[in-house]
């Protein structure tokens, strides 16, 4: 059976919300006497909201706390003005493969003006900045600041504010959804205007209170920000794309030979991180791909991103006689674009940049079906003329029709490529950037925001996915994250009761039960090692206390507290 995202029970949802609110309550309490601990708890709260959900796409209470912490940091002197506009791009981390890192590097490199562009990272060391970003910054006469080695979150915020006030005319936040440091840094009026790039428009993020303008990459992102984040300050900047290299048929032939695909066979291509293909109920890409290959029996499908050893893709390869191939993540997609005939967008979660790059490479494309709506799948000005399949059957029919009709492929791909070039390349894209520049706010201010609870769409889509990706026990997640941040996580009575009612698994499926200390460490260490801010030099003398606190609270302590607890966990 194909791996699916589980249903989210009300009890599990209540547990996630309780962990978030308990962490936030700790942050608020600490803000009166220990601002560093408050910042740590605020960061943990934002991480939990990002990884577990908190019932909203932004938290006015968390944002208000961060603005309060911002007032505890001294105001630096404003630097001297410059005839050359100076941009400061703020990242949590810069990655070498795709995403918002590649978007920013292209933005900087493609800006045809005389502006200067600099970079600062809040959770990364200088040696980890990828070459593409480094070269883009250097080509614009900018500088690179890294704050990842600074232990104190508030000190990082102070230094970031100082850099911005003294060296920048405009700040752009490309930050991770949980990064509270820039919100603390810019949580006071004054200094350069702050723009926030809405690269994660479908999930929780911080920064609504400090953003003088939200830069949206597509219309659905703006709609979500207005309806579910209460933000009405917007700009539009499509994803910038690199000019594609000349088509080299030898690249495509070499990929086909490597994968054992006949030269004349139709080839479908899809690109996306493995988790974007996890099925939600009947919305199952791998099953649909198998049906598509059954309908076009001489066709092959290459999936870039998922790995061949994942059970879903292994089973699909067997079912299709080896015609469905998961090849893992790849840095260079040119050969795969050259080898393919039709690009099909993955689902339940699409990859907008990958679809646009495929269309720009001259491939005909099929969007994800309507049951997978934006912002979870692709939309945008360049895709307006590309019809979205009505359902999974229509998706299969559109893909099969393109695979078996070279004339239809050429007609569709030509129109799509021209539309993408008008919006995402050269002078067309530069006109959108010029509009952003023309509408820059005169100064930086702080804003009051509020947001309603999740819309039904997120209940169906995003929250069950978070449960699937988190795995295991949310309380264990809370303990490990808090420990790695130097906090002393303790469960509240309501949190323990919510955990009991949720009946969650004690550990991720397939992991040996933690009967003894060694087994428990064997469970925790792999989880801790993938944390984005994990400290390899963590003080392990805390582990015995952490273990005792966890197991006592999880399985014993709640029983004593339950006697005096009569209210229902909301």
Image (spheres, grey):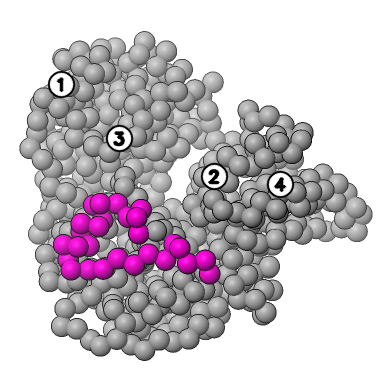
4 or 1: mark nearer the eye: 1
Dot placed on the residue nearer the N-terminal end, 3 or 4: 4
Q: Is residue 394 visible?
A: no
Q: CA distance from mark 2 to mark 3?
A: 23 Å
Q: For label 2, count other residues whose C-alpha is less than 10 Å away and answer few (under 14), some (14-19) or many (20+).
A: few
- Who is closer to the viewer here, 385 or 422? 422
- Against 500, is 144 above or below? below
Q: Which residue is mark 4?
A: 11
The residue at which mark 1 appears reads as: 253
Question: If you read the primary sequence from the N terminus, does the residue marked by circle 2 or circle 3 appear first?
Answer: 3
Location of mark 3 (residue):
330
Q: Position of residue 169 (x, y in %)?
A: 27, 79
Left or right, 135 with respect to 217, comes to left
Separation of disc 1 and disc 2 at Cα?
Answer: 40 Å
Label 2 SS: helix
Q: Secondary structure at mark 3?
A: loop
Q: Secondary structure at mark 1?
A: helix
Q: Residues within 10 Å of mark 1 (few under 14, many from 20)?
A: some
Sooner in the amino-acid sequence: mark 4 or mark 2: 4
Which residue is disc 2 drawn over?
529
Q: Magenta stretch: give its range.
A: 126-152
In the rendered image, the residue lying farthest to the left is 246
Q: Measured from the top left, where is residue 275 in percent x and y?
A: 45, 37
Disc nearest the viewer among 4 and 2: 2
Are the residues flagged by discs 2 and 3 in contact, CB closer than 8 Å?
Answer: no
């Amino acid at each position: 059976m194909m791996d699916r995202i589980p249903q989210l029970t009300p009890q599990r949802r209540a547990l996630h919300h309780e962990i978030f609110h308990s962490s936030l309550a700790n942050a608020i309490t600490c803000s009166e006497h220990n601002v560093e601990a408050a910042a740590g708890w605020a960061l943990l709260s934002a991480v939990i909201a990002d990884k577990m959900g908190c019932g909203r796409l932004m938290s006015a209470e968390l944002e208000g706390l961060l603005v309060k912490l911002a007032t505890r940091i001294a105001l630096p002197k404003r630097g001297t003005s410059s005839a050359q506009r100076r941009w400061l791009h703020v990242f949590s981390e810069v990655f070498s493969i795709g995403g918002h890192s590649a978007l920013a590097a292209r933005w900087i490199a493609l800006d045809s003006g005389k502006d200067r562009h600099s970079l600062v990272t809040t959770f990364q060391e200088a040696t980890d900045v990828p070459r593409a970003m480094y070269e883009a910054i250097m080509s614009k006469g900018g500088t690179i600041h890294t704050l990842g080695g600074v232990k104190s979150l508030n000190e990082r915020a102070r230094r970031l504010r100082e850099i911005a006030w003294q060296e920048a005319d405009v700040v752009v936040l490309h930050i991770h959804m949980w990064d509270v440091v820039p919100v603390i840094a810019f949580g006071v009026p004054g200094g350069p205007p702050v723009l926030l790039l809405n690269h994660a428009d479908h999930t929780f993020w911080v920064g609504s209170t400090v953003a003088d303008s939200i830069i949206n990459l597509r219309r659905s992102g703006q709609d979500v920000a207005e309806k579910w984040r209460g933000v009405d300050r917007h700009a539009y900047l499509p994803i910038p794309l690199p000019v594609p290299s000349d088509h080299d048929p030898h690249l495509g032939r070499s990929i086909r030979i490597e994968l054992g695909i006949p030269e004349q066979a139709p080839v479908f291509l899809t690109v996306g991180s493995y988790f974007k293909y996890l099925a939600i109920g009947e919305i199952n890409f791998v099953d649909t791909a198998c049906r598509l290959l059954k309908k076009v029996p001489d066709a092959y499908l290459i999936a870039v991103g998922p790995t061949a050893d994942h059970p879903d893709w292994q089973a699909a390869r067997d079912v299709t006689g080896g015609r469905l191939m998961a090849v893992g993540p790849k840095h260079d997609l040119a050969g795969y674009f050259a080898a393919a005939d039709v690009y099909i967008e993955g689902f339940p979660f699409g990859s907008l940049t990958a679809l646009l790059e495929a269309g720009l490479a001259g491939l005909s494309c099929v969007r994800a079906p309507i049951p997978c709506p934006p912002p979870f799948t692709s939309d945008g000005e360049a895709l307006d003329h590309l019809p979205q399949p009505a359902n999974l059957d229509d998706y299969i029919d559109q893909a099969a029709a393109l695979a078996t009709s070279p004339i239809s492929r050429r007609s569709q791909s030509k129109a799509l490529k021209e539309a993408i070039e008008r919006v995402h390349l050269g002078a067309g894209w530069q006109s959108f950037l010029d509009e952003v520049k023309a509408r820059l706010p005169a100064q930086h201010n702080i804003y009051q925001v509020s947001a309603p609870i999740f819309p039904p769409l997120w209940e169906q889509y995003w929250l069950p996915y978070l449960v699937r990706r988190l795995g295991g026990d949310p309380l264990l997640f809370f303990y490990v994250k808090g420990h790695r941040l130097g906090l002393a996580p303790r469960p509240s009575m309501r949190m323990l009761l919510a955990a009991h009612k949720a009946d969650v698994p004690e550990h991720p499926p397939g992991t040996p039960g933690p009967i003894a200390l060694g087994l428990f460490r064997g469970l925790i260490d792999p989880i801790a090692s993938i944390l984005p801010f994990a400290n390899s030099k963590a003080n392990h003398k805390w582990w015995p206390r952490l273990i005792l606190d966890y197991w006592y609270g999880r399985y014993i302590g709640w029983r004593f507290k339950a006697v005096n607890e009569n209210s229902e966990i909301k």
